[in-house]
Amino acid sequence: MVGDGSAEREVLRIMTGPWVARAVATAIELGVLDRLAEGAADGATLAAELDLNPDRSGRLLRLLASVGVLEESGGRYRPTGVGAVLRRGHPSGMADLALLYDSDMFTSAWARLADTVRTGETAFEIAHGTDAFTYLEGHPADAARYTAGMAASGRFATTLPDVHDFTGARVVVDLGGGDGELLATVLDRAPGARGVLVERPPALAAARTRLGAFVDAGRCELVEGDFLRGVPEGADVYMLSRVLHNWSDGDARTVLRHCREAMAPDGLVLIAERVLPDDGSPWLSAVLDAHMMVMTTGAERTERGYEALLRSAGLTTHRVLDLVLEMRLLVAGPVAS
């Protein structure tokens, strides 16, 4: 007996998740969601406009409707709220993130999950022969997709100035700041502050676009650098938004020590990460912790774990503030002498 089949149905829902993700990415690639964002259409019209096979595209539409990406009425399809954020050009950037998650760069690494669980080696390195950041330096197309996807997943950080007051900041250094969206938001909110973005070469082109006006105004500097080797000196705020989870405890400790040694006497380190609770794990944080295991030497950590790293670098947590999507902001400063 299999009872009412609910357990088996749940297993099927979980195991077919990658198929649904591939269907969503396909709809983005083929322009389906972009077209439907312009107005509802029936399957035949959509197939003709996008030069798709009517039968196959109709079945794709039916699947997308069944999982809540589209809704169907009278044979015509339109995006739901979920589908609306998946069109290219949407401010959320979720289309870029969906395409990144579906990329061979990610899926090949996840295919080696058993190897990393068995051996402790990083799955990405097993799949691609090098670490993720070195790989990106040699694969510009993947680097562009990665930068766009990370920009999308980091847009939550633009709410950071809503919970932390930057008004009195003099120099704000954003370490690993990607396309500069967070730093631009901070500089908008703190007109007396000057910014410094430290990034690797693949991300700097996008940052030049986003921060160009601040650079031209003399309020921002873009620095090609490696925060494992050192950070700009003298700032009163160092931001690490979704950075430390990419690195081992040893490397994360090195970054924090560089900040402690370089910072102004009254300086702060702002760490925006998914902070795991000390008991239990919300699903999003847990799955992204597994992703860190697959892609990097890092991890999502508990508040206690971050405090231990901070203490080892001469810093301590002053307060912890809630952000969106299970994110939290740790505001840290020097340990009192």
Image (cartoon, rainbow, N blue to C red):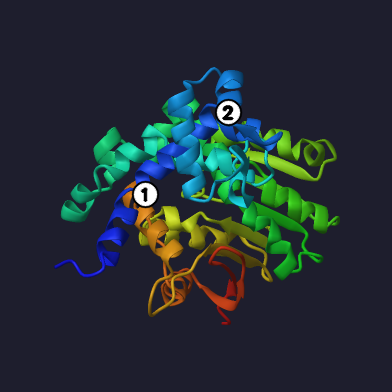
**In x, y percent, where is residue 125?**
28, 40
Q: Residue furthest front?
A: 74
The residue at 44%/76% (across/down) is: 277
Neighbours of disc 1 within 10 Å: few (<14), some (14-19), many (20+): few
Neighbours of disc 2 within 10 Å: few (<14), some (14-19), many (20+): some
Residue highlighted by disc 1: 17
Disc 2 secondary structure class:
loop
The residue at 70%/35% (across/down) is: 39
Give the quarter of the figure containing the N terminus: bottom left
Q: Taking the image as drawn, is residue 233 in sight? A: no
Q: Give how far apart the Cα atoms at labels 1 and 2 are.
A: 22 Å
Q: Quadrant of residue 89?
A: top right
In this view, the residue in front, 325 or 136, is: 325
In this view, the residue in front, 274 or 69, is: 69
Left/right placement of residue 35 relative to residue 187 reads left
The residue at 42%/43% (across/down) is: 21
The residue at 77%/63% (across/down) is: 169
**In x, y percent, where is residue 271?**
56, 64
Residue highlighted by disc 2: 31
Left/right placement of residue 332 relative to residue 256 reads right
Q: Is residue 43 above or below residue 324?
A: above
